[in-house]
């Protein structure tokens, strides 16, 4: 197949781009002619032809201008399948990895301070994103959609009921499982200055408001007299306010698997996450996860077996009970997860959907 992939920004080394890296590599290895249309990229991917799509304008204008520029570029060549990982104007397959912008705004309003709620979603950027999103989810513009959780599938059905559900494919995120199973726990603990007896929570992610870090810091401040409880925070965000003494800031890490290896539980309390990779990474390590029902990856969690799911990320009392549950469990070995976590399965299923779309285009 001759394939066009669309991604505004691509990094051959970025952890968040692992899905795109593996997909590009698998497509090239299988002999497919693969083209990547991007505004910016770092590094190169073997066997992939890069096309620079340069746009300018304000933050509000750039997503729309990029979509229009890519659409114009695609007219110059014929492709068997156009696969977009961005909200764009016309594509055979769209991967809704960012979920729905309108749902994200609803969640922001829900959890914002009362005085801030009327202001959430105002401005040209949000208007433009929702208009572009509506075009993307128009069944005349997109043949098939890939979602990474049933949560996002349900959101599409609710907000875009005209899009046929049989054309929506759930393909869950995957991770490189072996990467998270070959790190020395004792060495990782020494690296972060942790005692063998410490019970360690870990938070991994950037996006202060969306991923619930303020609630975790408040929780740890309330447990400052518990010398055996620690929180590792792996983030590139600039921290705000006073940091409790039982919180260890690592900064961004290229080898984030060391943070999971040092920890006992992943605590990740987003107000909206289509399907966070950190949950799969923690489960691949073998540690339980405490997350929220607003995270599509919560579908991987069986309560009390490999984690807990909170209905309210600000419910610190319930968070405390969940932490105590896993603390009382002790060293009972890695938790078990019933759904597969492997990235190769994700890539294989994605290629199957691309082939379906290419066959339909060929018949047309």
Image: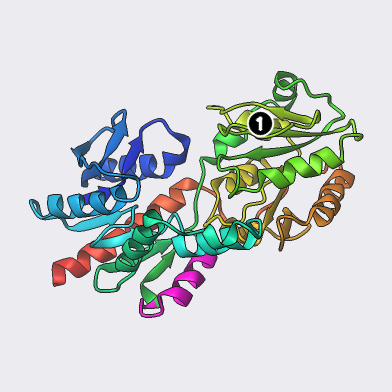
The outermost residue toward the left is 76
**Residue 241, x across and y down, in percent:** 70, 34
Can residue 100 be seen here? The reply is: no
Q: Residue furthest right?
A: 225
Above-or-below relation of 1 to 11: below
Q: Position of residue 191 (x, y in %)?
A: 70, 19
Residue 10 left/right relative to 188:
left
Q: Is residue 40 above or below residue 62?
A: above
Residue 262 part of the magenta segment: no
| Residue 309 image position (x, y, % from top left) | 71, 59
Quadrant of the rendered image containing residue 203:
top right
User: Per the image, is 163 magenta?
Assistant: yes
Would you say 301 lies left or right of 168 here? right
What predominant SS class does the magenta segment belong to? helix
Q: Nearer the viewer, residue 344 or 137?
A: 137
Count of labels in the image: 1
> Disc 1 marks which residue?
259
- Image point 45% across, 52% down: which residue? 345
Residue 54 is situated, as x and y percent measured from the top left of the image, at 20, 40
**Which contiguous range is marked in magenta?**
149-164
**Residue plotted at (21% across, 37% down):** 50
Q: Is residue 217 left or right of residue 144?
A: right
């Amino acid at each position: 197949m001759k394939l066009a992939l669309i991604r505004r920004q691509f990094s051959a080394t970025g952890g968040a781009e692992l899905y795109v890296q593996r997909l590009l590599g698998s497509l090239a290895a299988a002999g497919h002619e693969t083209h990547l249309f991007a505004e910016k990229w770092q590094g190169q991917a073997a066997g992939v032809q890069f096309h620079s799509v340069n746009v300018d304008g304000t933050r509000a204008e750039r997503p729309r201008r990029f979509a229009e520029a890519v659409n114009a570029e695609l007219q110059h060549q014929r492709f068997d399948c156009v696969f977009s990982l961005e909200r764009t104007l016309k594509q055979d397959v769209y991967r809704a990895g960012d979920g729905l912008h309108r749902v994200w705004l609803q969640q922001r309003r829900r959890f914002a301070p009362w005085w801030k709620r009327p202001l959430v979603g105002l401005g040209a950027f949000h208007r433009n994103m929702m208009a572009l999103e509506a075009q993307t989810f128009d069944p005349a513009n997109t043949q098939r959609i890939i979602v990474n959780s049933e949560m996002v599938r349900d959101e599409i059905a609710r907000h875009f009921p005209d899009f046929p559900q049989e054309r929506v494919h759930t393909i869950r995120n995957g991770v490189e499982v072996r990467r998270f199973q070959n790190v020395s726990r004792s060495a990782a603990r020494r690296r972060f200055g942790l005692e063998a007896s410490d019970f360690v929570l870990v938070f991994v992610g950037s996006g202060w408001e969306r991923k619930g870090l303020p609630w975790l810091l408040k929780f740890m401040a309330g447990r400052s007299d518990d010398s055996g409880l620690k929180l590792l925070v792996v983030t590139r965000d600039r921290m705000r306010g006073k940091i409790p003494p039982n919180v260890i800031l690592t900064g961004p890490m290229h080898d984030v698997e060391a943070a999971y290896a040092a920890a006992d539980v992943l605590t990740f309390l987003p107000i909206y996450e289509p399907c966070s990779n950190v949950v799969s990474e923690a489960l691949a390590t073998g540690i339980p996860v405490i997350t929220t029902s607003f995270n599509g990856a919560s579908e991987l969690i069986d309560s009390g077996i490999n984690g807990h799911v909170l209905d309210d990320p600000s419910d610190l009392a319930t968070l405390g009970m969940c932490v105590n549950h896993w603390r009382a469990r002790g060293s009972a070995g890695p938790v078990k997860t019933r759904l597969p976590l492997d990235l190769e399965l994700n890539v294989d299923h994605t290629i199957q959907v691309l082939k379906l779309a290419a066959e339909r285009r060929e018949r047309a």
